[in-house]
Image (tube, helix red, strand yellow):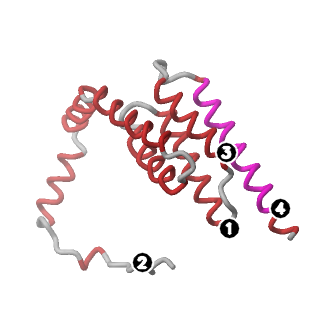
Amino acid sequence: MAKKAEVIPPSAYPQMVSKAQAVLMARTLRSQVTAVTASRVIEDSGEILRDAVRAYVEELEQAGMNFELVSEKAHEIRGFAETAGMLSAGRIADGLCRYFDDADKAGVPADAAVVALHVSAVGRTARDPDALSHMNDVVARELSALAGKKLAEARQKIIKR
């Protein structure tokens, strides 16, 4: 059974900086110079970031039917792919994460074929040299529709029992 989360009000945390310093930091973080510098750092690190996402993808593919590990790796990809410029891979991984979450909430097991299709699509998309391919977005939408349909079917089976 999951442990109940404890909510700690923000005012209970020790403050690292004074209010005046916080205002200055916020202004600096919102500045155009900071935005340009951050973009340049990410752009310069793009291939390293994409290689890291591809490493997660390999681990995702090797997880097989270990859905706990598949879910863990999909979460890593979802959180990291967009920063690496791999938007479609991130969207498909996000769809897989949502599918696992929805199946869990509905109390139904994840469909192995739906999971395998998502894993395959994440792998293909992550290796696609045309990262902005329109087809990748179509695949993400179709997988989302399939996942929704399979969840609805699984719920219906439970209701009929």
Label 1 is placed on what type of residue?
Gly
In this rendering, the answer to whether 116 lies above or below 111 is above
* Sequence-wise first label, 4 or 3: 3
Label 1, on which residue? Answer: 107
Residue at the image point whose x is 66% and y is 48% from the top: 112
* Sequence-wise first label, 4 or 2: 2
Instruction: Determine the image quadrant of residue 31.
Output: top left
Label 2 is placed on what type of residue?
Ala
In this rendering, the answer to whether 83 lies above or below 16 is above
| Magenta-colored span | 135-156
* Sequence-wise first label, 4 or 1: 1
Residue at the image point whose x is 51% and y is 32% from the top: 123
Nearest to the observer: residue 88 or residue 121:
121
Mark-to-mark CA distance, 4 and 2: 32 Å
Asked if the magenta segment contains residue 151, the reply would be yes
Label 4, on which residue? Answer: 156
Mark-to-mark CA distance, 2 and 3: 31 Å
